[in-house]
Amino acid sequence: MKRQVAGFLAAATAVSLLAGCSTTNEVPSASTAGSGTQAASAGNGSGVQLRFSWWGNDDRHQATQKAIDSFNSTNTSGITVSGEPSGFDNLQETFATRYVGGTNAEVMTLNFDWLATFGSKGDGFLDLSTIKDTFDFSQYDENFLKTGMMNGVQEAIPYGQNTMGFYLNKTAFERYGITELPKTFEDYEKDAAIVTAKDPDNYLLVSPTIRFAATYYLQQKTGKAEFNDDYTMNWTAEDYTDAVKWYKDMADKHVFCSREDYVENVGNDPVSVAQNEKFLNAGYLGVMEWTGGVASNEATLKEKGDTLVIAELPTIDGAKFKGTMAKPSLLMAIDKNCKNTKEAAEFLQYILNDPEGVKIMGTKRGMVASKAAQKTLEEDGQITGIVKEAYDFTAKADVINEVAFFESADFNNAYQQNYEQFEYGQISAEECGQAIYDANVSALDSLKAQNQ
């Protein structure tokens, strides 16, 4: 872990020097940043001061700062929290710089893969079992709560659950005379034939990366996750070969979009298609992605007069597992050197479980994992429509929770680079599967060495 953090720190230092020691992070508005600074200096009499770091846009900044201000004025323990917001730029490099330098906030927001990078041994952040008398962990699904564990230690609390799903433009299907949405992959194949008979360049599903569909397929085929917490792998080169063959067959039938089409109409990188012209014009009749993106996809289609719905999860033939995958959207952690852990836990309890704090925080971070928070937001009218459907879908779905290093760029690149060669006829399916397997083994070995 030290070597990996040192690498991020060196990169961050170089960027800082090139930029004249300035930051490229989004600067919060004066109204957002100012109130936190004033609150910290004013205090409420106890002298216990904490900092809370997060990132986002102005809406998230403002909602979070309002929650902080409310906590500062209402808590009876005399705690003062100040906010440390940032934009989306250079997140990991900035965090690594502050983490290594010991200047990070006492209460902090984490991306999922940071847990593996900075806390792989279970000692990167506070052991949260020490705050169980203050923070109500019973509001979280026991298995999903484990996504915040490393080496058996609860180092973080998952803010929300992202579940992989299929979201379909119901209106677009109806324009092709399809009144019953597909439920099986066979249904998708039949509907794709109907669509392409009229519009041969259209596809039923687009996804930010082929890896989503391949992982979905192989989890159902094997009944296992791709990786284990100890940096070992459950899938073989033959499994990856089967996955790329299956995906290409589906792409040839226009169920999933081809890599060539994705590059032409979306780009090289895995991004949201909510604003994509082909998606908005129903050239893609649906999308496969995390539930965290469903609200933005629905909103943009609604502007066009179309309706987005959450589809049933299709199952492959001979499936050993009939569900999908899940991961935390964000996590919350406490600095391992924090001297006021009870007070930090009180603040987390307020913004994650307490009705008043939850109402103010709202839905600016997407779906919440806390059962108490979900109940509060539903009763407050903040969870409605397709977002409510996404909660119901998540509650019913059988899921395999991914490990913290699942989103390492190396794994996505292995699929993207090798599948592209396979689709273009430059390598065989077997060569593609072997190349993905070899690249993943190499990446796992590197991650294991860096985090030991």
Image (spheres, grey):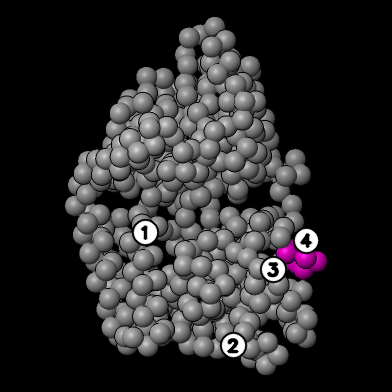
- Amino acid type, label 2: Glu
Residue highlighted by disc 3: 280
The magenta segment: 301-307
Q: What residue type is labelled 1?
A: Ala
Name the secondary structure under disc 2: helix
First-in-chain label (4 vs 3): 3
The image shows residue 178 at horizontal and vertical percentages of: 74, 84
Q: Counting residues from the N terminus, which is met first, the one under dot 4 or under dot 1?
A: 4
SS for callout 3: helix
Q: Residue 189 carries which label?
A: 2
Q: Which of marks 1 and 3 is in front?
A: 3
Tell me the mark number nearer the camera, choosing from 3 and 2.
3
Residue occupying image coordinates x 67% and y 30%:
356
Mark 3: amino acid: Leu
> Label 4, on which residue?
303
Please tell me in which quadrant of the rendered image residue 447 appears.
Answer: bottom left
Q: Which amino acid does label 4 sit on?
A: Glu
C-alpha distance separating marks 4 and 3:
9 Å
**Residue found at the very far top of the displayed protein:** 45
Mark closest to the chain's N terminus, 3 or 2: 2
Please state the horizontal and vertical placement of residue 441, each as a whole percent of the image.
Answer: 24, 66
Position in image of residue 265 (x %, y %): 57, 72
Q: Which of marks 2 and 4 is in front?
A: 4
Disc 1/disc 3 C-alpha distance (Å): 28 Å
Mark 1 or mark 3, earlier in chain: 3
- Location of residue 226 (image quadrant): bottom left
Distance of label 1 from label 2 (alpha carbons): 31 Å
Which of the two discs, 1 and 2, labels the residue nearer the N terminus? 2
State the residue position of label 1: 409
Q: Residue at x 19, y 47 (%)?
A: 452
User: Is 380 placed above or below 303 here?
Assistant: above
